[in-house]
Image: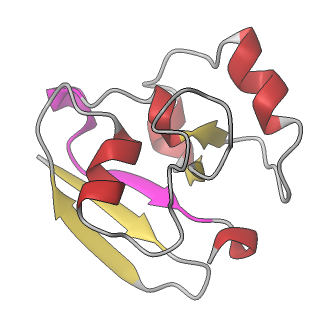
Amino acid sequence: MQVIFIDSEGMKTTITAAPGDSVMHCATAHLVPGLIGECGGAMACATCHGYVGADWSRQLPPPSTQEREVLSGCLDVQPHSRLTCQITLTAALDGLTITLPASQT
């Protein structure tokens, strides 16, 4: 399956991932610029903030209360902002698009 990351200038990076991985793990394992995942997925740093494509957002469970609290401290939060450490890849998410905020690139 594939995940597509788009930086703030529109440059796309397509990564092959495995179901069960988090989007953050996929990005950090492939050194996607602008997605650091400093806390390793513990929802403590928000360095994995990304914008989920609107069409994909409906396929994800809503963010938890803790995720919403962490996102509230991020720069450039938008309606489809998510912590990518909290998105687990499934076959249904093949082709998922994540745009990275300018504040992280």
**Image location (x, y in percent) of residue 46:** 67, 44
Residue 35 is one of the magenta-drawn residues = no
Q: Residue at x 36, y 79 (%)?
A: 12
Left or right of residue 76, residue 104 in this image: left
**Image location (x, y in percent) of residue 72:** 88, 36
Residue 87 vs 36, above or below: the answer is above
Front residue (pair 18, 61) = 18
Left or right of residue 10, residue 92 in this image: left
Quadrant holding the C terminus = bottom right
Residue 35 vs 68, above or below: the answer is below
The boundaries of the magenta stretch are 90-100
Number of marks drawn: 0
Residue 87 vs 14, above or below: the answer is above
Q: Residue at x 61, y 16 (%)?
A: 62
Q: Residue at x 77, y 41 (%)?
A: 79
- The image quarter containing residue 90 is top left
Q: Residue furthest top?
A: 65
Front residue (pair 40, 97) = 40
Left or right of residue 86, residue 83 in this image: right
**Image location (x, y in percent) of residue 53:** 52, 50
Q: Residue furthest front?
A: 39
Front residue (pair 90, 57) = 90
**Image location (x, y in percent) of residue 87:** 43, 30
State how the image is colored.
secondary structure
Front residue (pair 6, 35) = 35
